[in-house]
Amino acid sequence: MKRELLLFGCVGISALLMHFVIVSLWLVPAGLPPLAANVAAFLLAFQVSYWGHRCLTFQAHHVPHRQALPRFFGVASLSFALNEALYFVLLRFTPLDYRSALLLVLLLVALFTFLLSKWWAFAGKRPA
């Protein structure tokens, strides 16, 4: 479990950095509203997250791609819905800068994503 947490953190930080850079250095400065930029960045960072977790974090689980991809997309989508709702609340009701609010939200949602990924998205069949 410690190895999985470490790898999850490394992959997660990579996806988080990609997400953060896309929003803060590319899309918002180009004129896209932060919440819309967050959606686009999620879809791009999902690729890093899925393949990183499939090939590194949970590779020992030997879960078929056809099972893991839709499950992980479900987990990521649920996490993103939570992300977007929290991001909206922070942008609307706090004085936080959009970048600080995004970073806080991405970190808060990470543990939720790890648990659902480990116990459902990449969970293999249990031995009988």
Image (cartoon, helix red, strand yellow):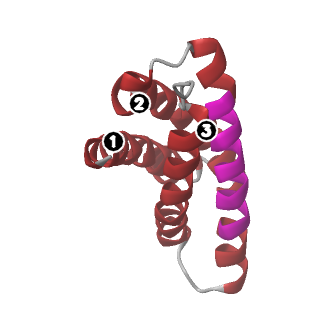
Residue occupying the point 63% across, 85% down:
94
The residue that disc 3 covers is 120
Residue type for callout 2: Phe
Residue closer to the observer: 44 or 107: 107
The residue that disc 2 covers is 58
Residue 82: in magenta span: yes
* Residue 4 - label: 1
Disc 2: CA contacts within 10 A as few (<14), some (14-19) or many (>=20): many
Distance from Cα at disc 2 to Cα at disc 1:
7 Å
Q: Position of residue 89 (x, y in %)?
A: 71, 75
Q: Quadrant of the C terminus?
A: top right
Residue 87: in magenta span: no
Residue closer to the observer: 127 or 50: 127
Quadrant assignment, res 95: bottom right
Q: Position of residue 21 (x, y in %)?
A: 43, 47
The answer to whether 20 appears left or right of 6 in the picture is right
Whether tag 2 and tag 3 are in contact, CB under 8 A, the answer is no
Residue type for callout 3: Trp
Q: Disc 2 or 1, which lies upstream in sequence? A: 1
Residue occupying the point 46% across, 62% down:
107
Quadrant assignment, res 86: bottom right
Tag 1's secondary structure? helix
Stretch of the chain drawn in magenta:
71-86
Eyeballing the image, is 92 above or below 51? below
Distance from Cα at disc 1 to Cα at disc 3:
14 Å
Tag 3's secondary structure? helix
* Residue 83 - label: none
Tag 2's secondary structure? loop
The answer to whether 71 appears left or right of 41 in the picture is right
